[in-house]
Image: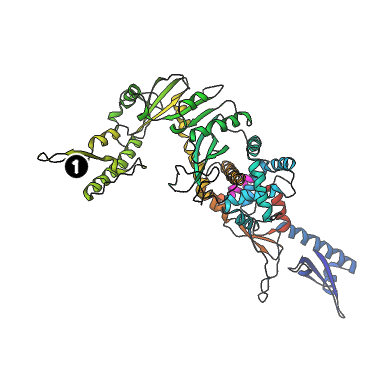
Amino acid sequence: MNLHISKSKNAESFYICRSYVKANGSTSSMIVRKLGTLEQLLAEHGPTRDDVLAWAKNEVKLETEKYKEEKTVLIPFHADRQLDYDKQVFFRGGYLFLQSVYYQMQINKICRKLKQRYKFQYDINAILSDLVYARVLEPCSKRSSYKAASEFLEKPSYQLHDVYRALDILGAGSDMIQAEAYKNSHFLGKRNDKILYYDCSNYYFEIEQEDGSKKYGKSKEHRPNPIIQMGLFMDGDGIPLAFSLFPGNANEQTSLKPLEKKVLGDFGCQKFIYCSDAGLGPEAIREYNHMGERAYIVTQSIKKLAKEEKEWALNLQGFKRVCDGTPVDITKLPEDDKGLYYKDEPYTTKKLHQRLIITYSPKYALYQKSIRDKQVERAQKMLDSGETKKNRKNPNDPARFIGKMAVTKDGEAADIKQYLDEDKIAEEAQYDGLYAVCTDLLDDEVDDILKVSEGRWKIEECFRIMKTDFTARPVYLRDENRIKAHFLICFLGLTVYRYLEKKLDLKYTCEELLDTLKAMNFAGIQEQGFIPLYRRESITDALHEACGFRTDYQFITKSKMRTIQKKSKGKE
């Protein structure tokens, strides 16, 4: 604010004015308040002109302080002026919250180590961070990610060709980046790495011929395309720890030891409980995780147990309530009972002394029965229509309940008669509600063991987020290093996202959080600042409080936005 004095032939007028920058970059001023003429002001603030001038300057000071307190911004708009050509007015701002976690993990310092190792000119931290943010907010190709990053409040400081060059470096340094990211993640709090979950999934390519590690294999999406497989370690809080890639035609069980050795060596994790499903918990893997300070909790297929253990598991006697150990006759439980019951016994194989825990849930039994009843109905319809072809690739195919028998009539050649196999239905029914867990933790409480085993759903959710929300497949890259870089970006995006979830105390679903971040956009106003285009809600308040800055003001000046950007990077 400043004092402006206008002199004319008959009067001297006093005004409080404010300067501002116009859209074309030039400066101008506007009248904020007219104080009056000298003649008018002498009567009240005189008796001399110097007295009026002193009063007027004090009014300017007061008006300036009031303006600073209110932070009122006056920006002229012209109804008869067209938009400028190629001028960006839309900006994405949701990445600022991801950026807060990214810099708390000090991934920028990892990029500095990459530059010292590989020697290049472009800003790999800017490239990696933008690719990570775009993978979460606008998952698409690398070219489209570069385009999306150009709409961020902070524009890319690199060119598109630098992105492809950086992929080679990121792929080559993938193992080092994972190890450093794990070590730096402790800046966000203690990791729950005493429990490590492991699982595998696969990703398809839009190609028809095998190439390198892209091989034909059993696709999770049942697609005929070549695939590549990913093994993923996750900690007890659902935060990714490490990943590895292996050929699509390889047995997933062979993927564990190389990655676990990396976790033991490069990450320094020596004492943990390995937890996985039955497919990734065969005898050899159990033996490996029985060594050192490690232990294991893996699911066990009841159908694959030896005869004696299988008969014991299917016997409905000897169950106890999990919460208090009270003996319970589960045959007398009502269908709507929501309790969980167990029995356990020592389970010794050639090399391991283990503990076999069988659980029973009436709720799970009712669910399995309802699914099977629908499949039996479909099997009966197949019999009635005569279309009983069995799909051997689908273990849940209703045709499995259709039996066949040879029928001889009047000594003639036998006919094949098909029928609903009640014995097969009854055989499957005896497994309803039962679930088995095998562990070498012989003295731990059953409740604690089952809680660890139940946490496996989080790693399945990790794969779902990567595949569905981050669109990690199909993969269009061909070079092995760049493929590894693509999955590294997905991995880091998932890690950053999971930490942001944790900062919000896991109060919001993945859909709610991602939709909110994607909607947190801004309009640039006459190069003076930004207006938020999103709706303020409890989730936006929670994001601001968790990350330590606010963007939910009616207007944010350019200098204030630069301060917010610095805060999101941990710089005051």
The answer to which of 470 and 421 lies nearer the viewer is 421
Q: In which quadrant of the rendered view does residue 525 lie?
A: bottom right
Seen at 44% across and 21% down, the residue is 354
Q: In which quadrant of the rendered view does residue 346 lie?
A: top left
Image location (x, y in percent) of residue 307: 33, 23
**Residue most toward the bottom?**
9
The answer to which of 314 and 172 lies nearer the viewer is 172
Q: Which quarter of the image is occupied by the N terminus?
A: bottom right
Circle 1 Cα neighbour tier, 10 Å, few/some/many (<14 / 14–19 / ≥20): few
Image location (x, y in percent) of residue 138: 57, 54
Image location (x, y in percent) of residue 213: 54, 42
Q: Which residues are magenta?
A: 540-549
Give left or right: position of 331 versus 141. Answer: left
SS at mark 1 in the image: strand
The reply to whether residue 260 is visible in this rendering is yes
On whether residue 480 falls in the magenta region, the answer is no
The answer to which of 359 and 285 lies nearer the viewer is 285
Q: Which residue is mark 1?
A: 417
Compared to residue 91, the image places residue 326 above or below, namely above
Compared to residue 475, the image places residue 320 above or below, namely above
State the scheme by which the image is colored: rainbow
On whether residue 548 falls in the magenta region, the answer is yes
Three-letter residue code for mark 1: Lys
The reply to whether residue 508 is visible in this rendering is no
Give left or right: position of 97 versus 200. Answer: right
**Residue most toward the left?**
410
Give left or right: position of 416 versus 211. Answer: left
| Main SS class of the magenta portion in the image | helix
Numbered-mark total: 1
Image location (x, y in percent) of residue 290: 51, 22
Compared to residue 172, the image places residue 269 above or below, namely above
